[in-house]
Image (spheres, grey):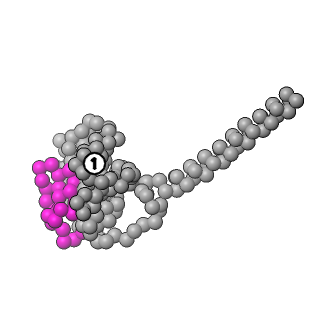
Amino acid sequence: MGNRKWWLMAGLVGGGIVFSVWDYSKWRHIELDNYGQGRGGSERREAVMELVEVYNSERLGVRFKYPSGWVISETTDGVESAGGEIKVEVEPSRENLPDIADREKERLVGEGAVWDGERGYVNTERVKWTTFEWERGGKSWAEGLTKNGDKLIKAVIMKDGGADWRQFLEGVVFIAVEE
């Protein structure tokens, strides 16, 4: 009788291992198919406005595309559009990106912004963004955080500003800055 119990246990353990490996490979395939594409899978949305103009700032070390008609100007700590549709800030930081993202989330929640509850990611060959979507006072915006060496880059894009915020973040490129 003891021999039967041993074989039954061995069969259950073996079946559990086989099922776990099968389930993991299925999950891994699903996860990796959509990696870096954010929520919603691999479908692409059409941009509300085409990003055709190029802004290049050697001082800040960034280049990005934006819709024609927007007026872009540099500020002391970054770049912003005259209508407030986008704002890109660059600041020195030695902290790691996850800690910065956690602190930024806590700051905005403390100020009364409503977070959609999921941290997103937009990844290109050159830039990897951590993203959040927010709402406050009838306005909604997306925020992207990334690092280039010891520089933190924060992009805030108003959702009703006319540009697809994911497409905007995908178009940001770091350029070499002579210091």
Q: Is residue 72 magenta?
A: yes
Residue 58 visible? The answer is: no
Quarter of the figure with the N terminus: top right
In the image: residue 178, left or right of residue 18: left
Q: Is residue 74 magenta?
A: yes
Q: Quadrant of residue 70?
A: bottom left
Q: Position of residue 99 (x, y in %)?
A: 32, 39
- Residue 107 or 71: which is nearer the viewer? 107
Q: Position of residue 111 (x, y in %)?
A: 22, 49
In the image: residue 118, left or right of residue 7: left
- Residue at the image point whose x is 30% and y is 54% from the top: 114
Neighbour tally class for label 1: few under 14, some 14-19, many 20 plus, Cα within 10 Å: some
- Residue at the image point whose x is 29% and y is 71% from the top: 49
Q: Residue furthest left?
A: 76
Disc 1 residue type? Val
Q: Name above or below for residue 50 compared with residue 34.
A: below
Residue 118 visible? The answer is: yes
- Residue 120 or 178: which is nearer the viewer? 120
- Residue 137 or 46: which is nearer the viewer? 137
In the image: residue 4, left or right of residue 40: right
SS type, badge 1? helix
Name the residue beneath numbered marker 1.
109
Q: Quadrant of residue 171?
A: bottom left
The span picked out in magenta is 61-89
Q: Residue furthest top?
A: 2
- Residue at the image point whose x is 49% and y is 56% from the top: 34
- Residue 137 or 14: which is nearer the viewer? 137
